[in-house]
Amino acid sequence: MLSVWSRIVGTAALCCCTWAVFAQNATITPKINSPFSRFGLGNFVSQYYAGPGGMGGLSAAFHDPYHLNTINPASLASLQSTAFEVGLNAQYSGLKSDGASESIWSGNLNYMALGFPLINPINEALDRKRSKFGLGMAFALQPYTVVGYNIESTSDQEDLGPTTNFLKGTGGTNRLLWSNAVKYKGFSGGVTLGYLFGQLTNSRRVEFDSVELAYVTEFLDEVSINGFFWEAGLQYTHEFKKLKATGELEPSGRRLIIGLNGNSSDNFNTNTSRFAERFNSSYGVQDTIFNETGVKQKGTLPSDLSIGVMYENVNDFRFGVEYGIENWSEYVNEAKPDSSLLDTWRIRAGMEWIPDYQSYNNYFERMRYRFGFYYGLDPRSFEGEQLKEYGVSLGFGFPIIMSRQRVSFVNLSLEAGQFGLSDTLRETFVKMTLGFTLNDNTWFFKRKFN
């Protein structure tokens, strides 16, 4: 048992070290350039991992013995092996508006998670006794939103002539998760406790182009965000039975899974610094308009709810659909009171197929092939119209046989779609996520010596 906890401590230390680098890349120097990230907390980062990502991001009714799903914590009770997941992503985005266009490549460490069953299935097999209960636990670190934009706009001001505004933003928010789940027969439930943290930096510089030797005015806001939140989930798995030759019923491998997950609105705290100055480089003059630090305020995150259903033939095929809503009209941020967000909904569908998971001479038949799509609304709006997002996904799961016949996976998901408004300002994107799932079934294994 001591060796198991030393693994947990060691893995947690590795996560924390990597997270320090990850947090800097995600919140201080993001590589995106999206004008939409000016509003709210920024552009949202997908919370699903590479495996479900190939299936359109299904999560409410998704559970797997080897892969993690922290969106619905109830799924962790179905784990049969310790899973350490790391994901890397790369994204190409093309922004187009009124004949102008811009493209950018971005990439980062996308998530890290560690999950494990607290009842080892090997012990149950050796004892020839299967517990009615299943217990699972997971820790995860991943970004929640990211801000990155650099905009230049020109307008005509009365009595001042042409005026140029330079808008720039960086930063983002991140989430630290601790999830626990319990399963009894076909029912499972889970709860996640989490911590949200990050910093948003927004600046605006105003230049009066037609006024000779005019002062330049610059505003800078830095908002630090932190707060606790909770999420909960339920899943029910109905196993279809078949009749054995002895007349007894046994699981046929076919099952139907119904899942539900969500949370109520949560509060967060902000600590804001605001600075404004006027300067004239020609005269070498600089004048501070105001300088505020340590302004403490509050905010509210929205409630959300997702429900899904999935049909599965174990180690062969699964297909699922999901519908979710988020009540972003509940969102409040006293540090940025001008944010006006709307309620959203999203629908997802996806499938996975394994030609022959026991094939010994054809690796491609042991692979997992995934496909999915999603469509929904974003809480932000532009010129009075709510933004839309839709995309299709394609995924592959590459099984890897480790020592002692342990199976791990390399998962690749590809997503392509559009975000924004088709007639005015839209972003076309192609995103690749490469995930590594390392499995180990020896955690919490009780060794017996005679």
Image (spheres, grey):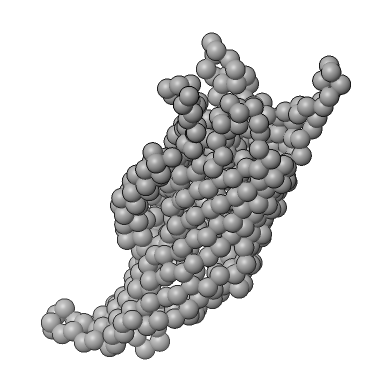
Asked whether, in this view, residue 163 is left or right of residue 183, the answer is: left
- Outermost residue toward the top in this view: 361
- Indicate the position of residue 312 as horizontal and vertical percent values: 71, 34
What is the quadrant of the N terminus in the image? top left
- Indicate the position of residue 238 as horizontal and vertical percent values: 76, 39
Asked whether, in this view, residue 114 is left or right of residue 279, the answer is: right
For residue 341, say whether it is visible: no
Nearer to us in this view, 52 or 163? 52
Asked whether, in this view, residue 302 is left or right of residue 113, the answer is: right
Residue 295, by quadrant, is: bottom left
Tell me the residue at 62%/19% (across/down). 356
133 relative to 370, above or below = below
For residue 8, say whether it is visible: yes
Nearer to us in this view, 161 or 344? 344
- Indicate the position of residue 59 as horizontal and vertical percent values: 62, 47
- Outermost residue toward the front in this view: 450
- Indicate the position of residue 189 as horizontal and vertical percent values: 65, 52
Tell me the residue at 33%/49% (across/down). 13
Tell me the residue at 55%/35% (across/down). 120
438 relative to 359, above or below = below
- Outermost residue toward the right in this view: 247
Nearer to us in this view, 321 or 205? 321
Tell me the residue at 45%/57% (across/down). 176
404 relative to 146, above or below = above
Nearer to us in this view, 144 or 376? 144
> Total marks drawn?
0
